[in-house]
Amino acid sequence: MDQNPSVNTGVFLLGPLNPISGLRPILELGPAPARPVDRVPSRQEQRGPRHMERRILKSGEPAYYWKVPTRDRDNGCAIPAEPLGTDFESASRRADELNELLDRWRVERKVHLALRPTTMIVACVPNENVDPV
């Protein structure tokens, strides 16, 4: 009888223990484990376009929302926050459209601020050498 048998893990077959390294070589790979039905979203799905948020509904389904950043909303941006739906592709397209609109608003705001007249502050300092009138 073999004192150091091969081991079947259910995923792959491990060979006999190497007395020097203490490791078992992989002899045979089994079938790949099935991917779960509720898969983990891809990195792109997790991130999505700028200002798009992913939230999980009570049903367990992901839903996507777009919202104006607080700094822009505080500066007078009138673009409303918007629910984008549960389909990532269509939500991404709409979020891209809203981001373009926000970018145009930011450019127009910069132009408007640049054209705004500046305020000049003049300090009145009394001159001791001049006689008061």
Image (spheres, helix red, strand yellow):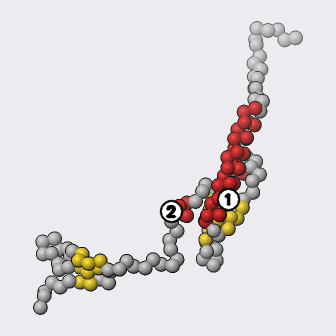
Q: Which residue is drawn at 75% across and 22% down?
A: 123
Q: Can residue 71 be seen in this view?
A: no
Place of residue 15 in the rendered image (x, y in percent of width and height, measured from the top left): 20, 79
Does dot 2 land on a helix, a strand or a loop? helix
Place of residue 52 in the rendered image (x, y in percent of width and height, measured from the top left): 63, 59
Place of residue 18 in the rendered image (x, y in percent of width and height, measured from the top left): 15, 75
Badge 1 is on which residue?
94
Q: Which mark is residue 43?
A: 2
Judge whether 95 appears above or below 19 on screen.
Answer: above
Q: Residue at x 66, y 52 (%)?
A: 99
Judge whether 122 appears above or below 105 on screen.
Answer: above
Residue type for callout 2: Arg
Q: Which residue is drawn at 77% across and 16% down?
A: 126
Residue type for callout 1: Arg
Place of residue 77 in the rendered image (x, y in percent of width and height, measured from the top left): 74, 49
Is 45 on the left or on the right of 27, as rendered? right
Judge whether 116 appears above or below 47 on screen.
Answer: above
Could you tell which of marks 2 and 1 lies nearer the N-terminus?
2
Q: Is residue 28 visible?
A: yes
Is 43 on the left or on the right of 4, as rendered? right
Q: Quadrant of residue 131?
A: top right
Q: Quadrant of residue 11?
A: bottom left
Mark 2 vs mark 1: in front: 1
Q: Residue at x 75, y 29 (%)?
A: 118
Query: Which is more toward the observer, 114 or 74?
Result: 114
Determine the CA span between mark 2 and mark 1: 19 Å
Quarter occupied by the N terminus: bottom left
Is 102 on the left or on the right of 31, as rendered? right
